[in-house]
Amino acid sequence: MTDTVVLTGGRVLDTEAGRVREGESVIVRDGRIAEVGSGIAAPTDAQVVDVGGRTIMPGLIDCHVHVVAESLDLWSNMIAPSSLAGLRSARVMEEMLQRGFTTIRDLGGADHGLVRGIDEGLIDGPRIVICGKGLTTTGGHADLRPRTDDRPTMMHYRLGSMGYVADGVDEVRAACRTLIKEGARFIKVMANGGVSSPNDPIDSIQYSRDEIAAMVEEAENAGMYVAAHLYTDKAIRRCVELGVFSLEHCNLIGEETARLAAEKGCIAVPTLVAYEGLWLDGKELGLGKSEFDKIDVVRQGGLKSLQIMRDAGLKMAFGSDLLGQLRKYHCMEFELLAKVLTPAEIIRSATVVGAELCRLEGEAGIVKAGALADLIVVDGNPLDDISLLQDDGAHMALIMRDGKVFKNTLN
Ligand SMILES: [Zn+2]
């Protein structure tokens, strides 16, 4: 085995320009892209891989996942021993890499152990950017205790837990500092009601302005940002005003708020497939009428929100947010986005914009010299046919992260 690999005989997808460049080769060395272009000479010691006219593009980035949510039963995830939760998470991550996702951003659950597991080669999964746990108020979106459960706290110290209950400015600051000390790269806050939680209607506003401002300050002091779980226009607007950078879901955003968010340079992460999946499998999963009603509100709003955000010039990053067995629908997000966005816009959201949210600008989501060698080789041209990114990686002949090959059906 040599350290240098040359991918040749195809075209390169330029995610920034939204076009392909025919006849270009990519030289990979020591986990990075060493050179890209046409007519470049392969080093004599290189392993040459002919991609047979396929498209070489950056690995995909999913900016909203929960790898510890192996089951839709969030309680069972939380009370599982952390060792078991870790092994289950590894499997979830390995499935994601085989779908072509080479970087994922986890919005609550994953810890630094999983980051290390990837670095040490223990998990054949994507690079993972973590927030630790999602901050929630008592009774908020990540407080899973039913009304009759008076246990004093949630088990945020368990790997399988997605949330961390913190109330009041002082507790919030302490929680942010703990999460950052433990390896968080951004802070996640539940600032609005949710679909999967027992006690909070989706239009409930969560956390006070002072508490969110404290999170923004703590994050910014550490060179980070806050990502907020949001559905309603009112909740989104409040967070944008308070300096939140990453706006998750945004199903019910209005035009004016979208424009304000764009002006402030925010990035939104729509996650349409999460609701589509619940809608499709809800009956089987035993969801009741009140849950179905909540799901329908955000599901109907989702497609409209894409239009509003695009027209406002608000950047969007690709996200899926699928829990438990619904993760089989992961790649359906491409299909849903395609109802409104062009393939070039969708690819940008799952590469360049995603890299920005992961603070990997110029490192991931792009095929250029010096970037991380996160590459996929796709049959045909996804700019003409976005469905090539669907079907769990079936149209991907090669998947590489950090220069390491995790799938290769080319030779
Ligand atoms: Zn989520």
Image (cartoon, rainbow, N blue to C red):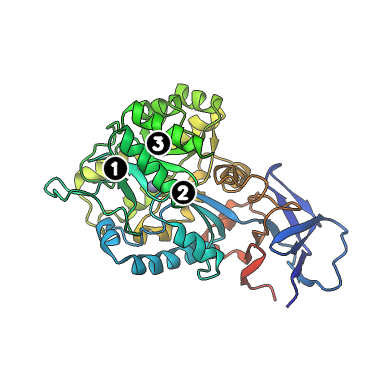
Query: Is residue 135 in view from this perspective?
Result: yes
| Numbered disc total | 3
Q: Please state, as top left, top right, bottom left or bottom right, where the N terminus lies in the image.
A: bottom right
Q: Quadrant of residue 17?
A: top right
- The answer for how far apart the CA atoms under marks 2 and 3 are is 26 Å
Q: Which residue is mark 2?
A: 184
Using the image as rendered, state which of residue 295 and residue 265 is in the foreground. Answer: 265
Amino acid type of the residue tagged 3 in the rendering? Asn
Mark 2 vs 1, N-terminal side = 1
* Residue pictured at 31% horizontal, 38% vertical: 171
Q: Which mark is residue 251?
A: 3
Mark 3 vs 1, N-terminal side = 1
Q: Which mark is residue 141?
A: 1
Amino acid type of the residue tagged 1 in the rendering? His
- Looking at the rendered structure, the secondary structure element under dot 1 is loop
Q: Residues within 10 Å of mark 1 (few under 14, many from 20)?
A: many
**Where is residue 408 shown, x and y percent of the image?**
64, 72
